[in-house]
Amino acid sequence: MTNADSHRAPGAREAALQVVVLAAGKGTRMRSRLPKVLQPLAGRPLLAHVLDTAHALHDARCVVVVGHGAQQVRAVFAANGQLAFREQEPQLGTGHAVLQACPALDDAGIVLVLYGDVPLVRAQTLQPLLDAARGGALAVLTVLLEQPDGYGRIVRDAQGRVTRIVEHKDATPAEHAIREVNSGILAAPAAALKRWVGALRNDNAQAEYYLTDVVQMAQAEGLPVQGVVAGDAEELMGVNDRLQLAQLERVVQRRHAERLMREGVTLLDPARIDLRGELVCGQDVRIDVGCVFEGRVELADGVHVGPHCVLRDCRIGAESRIEAFSHLDGASCGEGARIGPYARLRPGSELARDVHIGNFTEVKNSRIGDGSKANHLSYVGDTTVGERVNIGAGTITCNYDGAAKHRTVIEDDAFIGSDTQLVAPVRVGKGATLGAGTTLTRDAPAGQLTVSRARQVSIVNWARPQKKPSNES
Ligand code: UD1
Ligand code: CA
């Protein structure tokens, strides 16, 4: 490991840190229309993870080198005013990419190079590299892998000093056996790095300007080269194809699951939860298998989520039960909700306390008051429902006339019979009852029974048509 602190004068101010993130590559091996650095990992672009790490390094200035799909990449990160972008066109290799960033880099201070496709590295892992670079060294982050295929190999001399990095495609069979590989991440004094990348050549198997060749240049100038071996190989896994992307996804999900369990959440199987955003849990939250959480989800104390639910941008009140196979998007539930199984809450669903939404019921842009229930097979859209309302099976709010949406209002203590259509705009008064099968086109007065179905008749002596006997069989 490094001992770079000894190079630094006592009390010296820390040299300014500039981070270059390489994100111009096409990612051919992904076989995708989406630029590689925009491929989602745990619901966010790969590059977003790398920028989080850069952000965690104090006071770092960040330059992102974009190229393939540059417009798309820039658009995704346009809101981040801190970033500077440099374009690399055409993309002639990692060294060529750093060269494009050079005009944006001050000679003073140090430069850290991160790869847009190495998303899991933690800021604390980078610290020894920064220390070494501040001490005047070129520092490369390496890792020991059981399966080093595809990675650049770290070649060390008899004294253990890093002498060069050889790409897999350029390596000899003996070099292929080396298990210490290049993570791609390196740090160096800015002026030196700028000088080196300006002098790179592309006489190699891929006819690319390899950033890794700066190792030999540092050597030639007599500058120390530090190979910092990272303890956690998982952190430095790169994404080149969809297999590796899937492997990293599992790593991230396991990290999330472990954190949740440490925070006191019960996961029935930590290997079967997918968190693609932020999940904030109270005490004694219990999550069954196969659930997906997206955006920001808050689960208050004692919430149980059944198997195979999807929750996106939701707030769920204490002691609520979300039963199996429910889909909640942009919804908020008060305490004691009973949702599902097989319920769907769409954006703008605001449920007060003790609300029950049962199987195959869809709610959208509606407020539902305390203790109200829609337990079976209903559509409640653009509706204001009061307290203690019972919505019978098969009730539909007809909120859309083909051009505009209209609201339905159902006041407190109303009882909506099964298979009722409420043709909005329409109001059901307090305590009103709608008979089963009603098609409500005008307001229903408070406290009365309103029913619109045809009267039942029975026809005596009616004969059911008979089939004629046939000769053909
Ligand atoms: C690179 C390293 C290899 C290391 C591996 C670790 C080089 C020459 N090789 O190989 O030693 O083991 O990463 O994951 O550096 N990029 C550009 N412009 C380009 C080419 C690439 O911005 O012209 C970016 C890519 O978007 C990507 C990163 O640089 O984020 C790495 O490029 P990639 O082609 O994946 O390099 P590897 O072959 O994986
Ligand atoms: Ca790579």
Image (cartoon, rainbow, N blue to C red):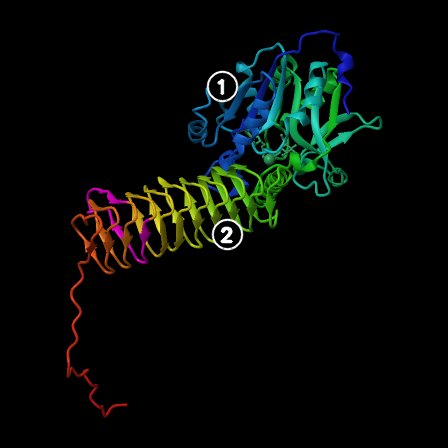
Q: Can you identify the residue that label 1 sits on?
A: 82
Query: Where the N terminus falls, by quadrant?
Result: top right
Q: Residue at x 57, y 11 (%)?
A: 106
Magenta residues, start to end:
389-411
Q: Can you identify the residue that label 2 sits on?
A: 308
State whether residue 171 is above or below residue 100.
Answer: below
Q: What amino acid does circle 2 point to?
A: His
**Front in this rendered view, residue 5 or 152:** 5
Sequence-wise, the earlier of marks 2 and 1 is 1
Query: Where the C terminus falls, by quadrant?
Result: bottom left
Which residue is outermost to the right? 158
Residue 437's x, y, as percent?
23, 60
**Cα–Cα span, label 2 and label 1:** 39 Å
Residue 394 is covered by the magenta coloring: yes
Residue 187's x, y, as percent?
66, 21
**Front in this rendered view, residue 287 or 44:** 287
Figure quadrant, ligand 1 = top right
Q: Looking at the image, do the residues carrying marks 2 and 1 touch, with CB atoms under 8 Å apart? A: no
Q: Residue at x 55, y 42 (%)?
A: 29
**Secondary structure predominantly adopted by residues drawn in magenta:** loop
- Whether residue 40 is visible to the viewer of this picture, yes or no, is no
How many residues crowd mark 2 within 10 Å: few (<14), some (14–19), many (20+)?
A: many
Q: Residue at x 53, y 31 (%)?
A: 47
- Whether residue 177 is visible to the viewer of this picture, yes or no, is yes
State whether residue 25 is above or below residue 241.
Answer: above
State whether residue 122 is above or below residue 245.
Answer: above
Instruction: Choose mark 2 or mark 1, whichever is in front.
Output: 2
Residue 190 is covered by the magenta coloring: no
Q: Residue at x 39, y 51 (%)?
A: 357
